[in-house]
Every structure is written in C-alpha cells, then in structure tokens.
Image (cartoon, rainbow, N blue to C red):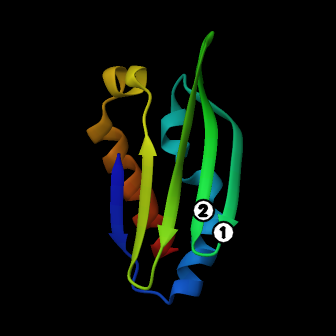
Amino acid sequence: MKVVVHHGKTQAEAIDIVDRSADHLFDYASGGSVELTDRKKDWNGPKMDFSLMARLGFIALPVAGVVFVDEVTITVECDLPPLVRTFVGEEKIQAGVEKKVRGMLAE
C-alpha cells in the first residue's frame, strides 16, 4: 500500500508533524475490535520506519512500513498482511491513512 500526500509545509515542519502524530496515523483501524499494539518508530533523516501489531481476538498480525517526508510530499508505504487486505480492504485502509495524514497537516 502506498499513500502520497502533498504537505504544503517546509520539510522540517512536515517531519515534526509526522513525528508528533505517528501514533495516531493508524488509529482509525482500532476504533472497532482491532487493537494496535507494540508501536515502534525510528527516524533516519527524513525517513521513519514503523511497525506495530494489529490484534483481533487471538490473531496478531505484524504491520511495518516507512514514512518518507520530502520537500513536497509525505509518502506512507507498508505491506499489509493478506488477512487485513481480505477482511478490511487495502482501498479502505489507504483512504483512511490519507485522511489521517491530511488531518495531521490541517491541525
């Protein structure tokens, strides 16, 4: 899955926004019965590696990816586990992540 959003900020401002808001980026998925745990993030310049566990009952699925902030865009890339793509849908997650990124930038 890949989401690209134009940020309209300086690169440093956009990095700061992503860093402060990273924990909330995928929160829309946890509104139901999915719990997101073991969240980790690690910055290397303008690139943030992230990982988390998506838990639904006794099923735990790892999700990992990168967020890259350049002078113009914020790009979120991650490989979704097949169960997530099947039961939630990549398009739904993609739209939700894009909405969250745009919301972060508007705050």
Q: Amino acid at mark 1?
A: Asn
In the rendered view, does 35 fall on the left or right side of 105?
right
* Count of residue discs: 2
Residue at image coords 38%, 57%? 99
Q: Secondary structure at mark 1?
A: strand
Say left or right for 54 vs 84.
right
Residue position for label 2: 48
Identified at 55% across, 42% down, the residue is 64
Q: Quadrant of the N terminus?
A: top left
> Is 91 rendered above or below residue 21?
above
Q: Residue furthest top?
A: 58
Q: Is residue 78 left or right of residue 91?
A: right
Q: Position of residue 49 (x, y in %)?
A: 60, 55
Do callouts 1 and 2 mark residues in contact (Cβ within 8 Å)?
yes
Please tell me which residue is depicted at 52% across the width and 55% down the height of the picture: 66
Query: In the image, what residue occupies the spot 45% across and 46% down?
Result: 78
Looking at the image, which is closer to me, 6 or 47?
47
Q: How far across and down, in percent of the image, does residue 67 sit?
A: 51, 61
Q: Nearer the viewer, residue 27 or 89?
A: 89
In front: 11, or 93? 11
Rendering coords of residue 105 (x, y %): 47, 73
Q: Say above or below: 54 vs 97.
A: above
Give how far across and how far down residue 20 sits, in percent: 67, 67
Mark 1 is surrounded, within 10 Å at the Cα level, by few (under 14), some (14 to 19) or many (20 or more) other residues, namely few
**Residue 80 lies in what quarter of the image?**
top left
Q: Is residue 8 above or below residue 64?
A: below
The residue under label 1 is: 44
Instruction: Say above or below: 64 vs 85.
Output: below
